[in-house]
């Protein structure tokens, strides 16, 4: 169906369109202006595939304040329809659609049964590196990462982020590299994130499988090269509170975090209560760049609520501080579902990024392995305050969102995780998610895609790179300071090499300007011995022989 918006508006008041939406005719009439009838009893929660042939249509649906599920190709958007008011909102806006999931709860029960059967049929395990046959629980992530760190003590260690979640949970990850404990060694950093959105379970599974894969295959030439030259950081569950609500079964469709009231911690158990289901801040609208702009909602009951302020949430503070304190040259934030590789910018009014060609070619190459489409974020629908828009704007590190799969937030384990991880299936003939992650790892090692600062200094002194600038939310008058600060310890040879992001951030480059890093060197007591300003472009190398 490729009717234009006008025609669909007319069609909706007819019986056919009302039926595909599962609407009683009266709702269609109310959309045409008649007095609103009493809403009918709300039936089961459904997923409705809404026709959105143009980007304007998609933005219009996104702006209705409904809960968007994903897309299957960008010509439609799957919308979660929970109440008759949701149906009415779609109808009023003139959209038609087809029910693709009649009863979300029943579908979830079927998924659980299918997963049980799959696990029973695979006593020897799956083809995943971990051999797992079922979705992990929150506890599994912590236990398994700790076990990996214990099994591979020179190649893996646990990473605990700075802020506990609102319900007091640790936010954990794993750091993987050859010689992982020699931190501050100047290697470029590659960051993989999962579960910003609570219900998007495969996003955590896929990055955790990659951790197993790197460690188990560390002796193969390809992975050895990666681990010799790159530090891989993996945070499977950025939003553990939300994940616990979803995975723990209280509310499988939970998306946001557990900020039920701005500025306050939730009471014990409150986040899982039915009455609080709609509340929370969307971690993927809470980052600083363009915060509270298009495609984000000011209403705490909307699924894209941008929160009380830029970085008001522990989940986004954690990722901000991680990215600001490491030289993250490539970041992939994993989500489900839509079979997309998205690159900045998320808003159609933004300037074309200075590194558009580079992000396009890398995005296309990764997408090809997964049979996903590779597009700019805004080509899906407008967003603001997302992870990669902030990280790219602030650091110049290449940033992507992967939207895995087409069959739901957490489809059957076999089709949602096992198949896509290594590809080679009918739906994904390429090398799958694994190959896409490896391509990004190799890209992270490629100095032509970041910058290098090198020199000589006294072994053991600490070098510090810093930069402070303003990050602009949607209202530029509310710009706030952002600081990047990372360190390197000069090795025994005295010769140091630091793989960093360019000194000039993308917006500065686009405006024709240059920017510098401030490089200091300190003795072990913390006394600053020398300070230099360093200008280095993407692909460039700067040599700094410090007086220390
Ligand atoms: O809306 C989102 O946050 C992401 N989709 S999801 O269904 N997983 O919620 C898309 C984010 C896209 N990022 C940008 N457009 N920059
Ligand atoms: Zn998501």
Image: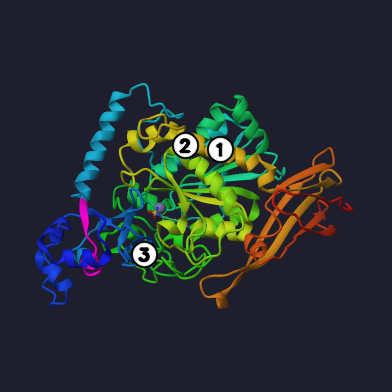
Q: What residue would you read off at disc 3?
A: 56
Q: Nearer the viewer, residue 247 or 34?
A: 34
For image coordinates 29% across by 51% down, the residue present is: 250
Locate residue 439: give its quadrant: top right
Q: Nearer the viewer, residue 412 or 338?
A: 338
For image coordinates 80% across by 40% down, the residue present is: 491
Residue mark closest to the camera, 3 vs 1: 3
Q: What residue would you read off at disc 1?
A: 439
Is 281 positioned to the left or the right of 65 in the image? right
- Can the viewer see residue 175? no
Q: Which residues are magenta?
A: 89-99
For image coordinates 70% across by 39% down, the residue present is: 182
Contact between labelled residues 1 and 3, with CB atoms less than 8 Å apart? no
| Crowd tier of the residue under label 3, counting other residues whose Cα lies within 10 Å: few below 14, some 14–19, many 20 or above | some
Q: What residue would you read off at disc 2?
A: 369
Q: Is residue 275 above or below residue 448?
A: below
Q: Earlier in the sequence, mark 3 or mark 1?
A: 3
Is 447 positioned to the left or the right of 71 in the image? right
Q: Is residue 343 above or below residue 309?
A: above
Contact between labelled residues 2 and 1, with CB atoms less than 8 Å apart? yes
Q: Indicate whether residue 415 is drawn in magenta.
A: no
Query: Where is residue 293 shown, x and y percent of the image?
Result: 46, 69
Q: Please, what secondary structure does the residue beneath circle 3 have? A: helix
Q: CA distance from mark 2 to mark 3?
A: 29 Å
Q: How is colour applied across the structure in the image? A: rainbow
Q: Earlier in the sequence, mark 1 or mark 2?
A: 2
Is 421 positioned to the left or the right of 42 in the image? right
């Amino acid at each position: 169906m490729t009717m234009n918006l006008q025609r669909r508006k007319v069609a909706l008041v007819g019986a056919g369109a009302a039926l595909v939406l599962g609407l009683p005719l009266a709702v269609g009439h109310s959309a045409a202006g008649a007095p609103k009838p009493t809403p009918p009893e709300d039936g089961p929660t459904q997923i409705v595939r809404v026709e959105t042939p143009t980007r304007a249509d998609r933005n219009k649906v996104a702006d209705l304040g409904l809960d968007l599920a994903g897309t299957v190709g960008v010509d439609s958007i799957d919308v979660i329809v929970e109440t008759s008011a949701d149906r009415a909102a779609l109808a009023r806006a003139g959209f038609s659609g087809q029910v693709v999931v009649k009863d979300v709860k029943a579908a979830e029960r079927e998924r659980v049964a299918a997963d049980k059967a799959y696990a029973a049929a695979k006593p020897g395990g799956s083809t995943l590196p971990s051999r797992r046959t079922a979705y992990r629980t929150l506890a599994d992530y912590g236990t398994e990462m700790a076990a990996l760190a214990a099994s591979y003590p020179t190649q893996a260690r646990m990473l605990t982020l700075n802020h506990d979640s609102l319900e007091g949970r640790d936010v954990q990850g794993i750091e993987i590299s050859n010689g992982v404990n020699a931190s501050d060694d100047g290697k470029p950093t590659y960051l993989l994130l999962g579960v910003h959105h609570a219900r998007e379970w495969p996003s955590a599974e896929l990055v955790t499988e990659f951790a197993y894969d790197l460690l188990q295959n560390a002796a193969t030439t390809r992975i050895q090269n990666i681990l010799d030259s790159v530090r891989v950081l993996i945070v499977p569950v950025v939003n553990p509170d939300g994940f616990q609500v979803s995975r723990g079964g209280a509310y499988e469709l939970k998306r946001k975090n557990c900020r039920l009231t701005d500025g306050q911690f939730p009471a014990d158990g409150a986040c899982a209560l039915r009455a609080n289901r709609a509340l929370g801040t969307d971690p993927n609208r809470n980052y600083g760049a363009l915060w509270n702009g298009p495609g984000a909602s000011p209403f705490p009951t909307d699924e894209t609520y941008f929160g009380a302020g830029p970085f008001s949430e522990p989940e986004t503070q954690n990722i901000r501080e991680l990215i600001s304190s490491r030289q993250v040259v490539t970041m992939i934030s994993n989500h489900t579902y839509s079979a997309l590789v998205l690159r900045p910018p998320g808003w159609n009014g933004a300037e074309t990024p200075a590194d558009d060609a580079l992000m396009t070619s890398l995005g296309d190459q990764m997408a090809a392995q997964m049979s996903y489409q590779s597009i700019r974020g805004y080509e899906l629908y407008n967003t603001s305050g997302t992870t990669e828009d902030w990280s790219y704007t602030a650091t110049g590190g290449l940033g992507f969102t992967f939207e895995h799969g087409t069959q739901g937030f957490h489809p059957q384990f076999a089709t949602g995780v096992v198949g896509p991880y290594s590809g080679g299936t009918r739906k994904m003939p390429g090398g799958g998610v694994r190959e896409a992650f490896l391509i990004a790892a190799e890209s992270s090692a490629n100095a032509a895609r970041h910058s290098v600062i090198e020199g000589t200094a006294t072994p053991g002194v600490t070098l510090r790179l810093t930069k402070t600038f303003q990050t602009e939310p949607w209202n530029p008058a509310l710009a706030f300071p952002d600081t990047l600060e990372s360190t390197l310890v000069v090795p025994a040879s005295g010769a140091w090499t630091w793989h960093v992001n360019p000194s000039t951030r993308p917006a500065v480059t686009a405006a024709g300007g240059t920017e510098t890093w401030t490089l200091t060197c300190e003795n072990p007591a913390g006394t600053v011995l020398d300070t230099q300003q360093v200008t280095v472009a993407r692909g460039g190398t700067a040599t700094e022989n410090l007086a220390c």
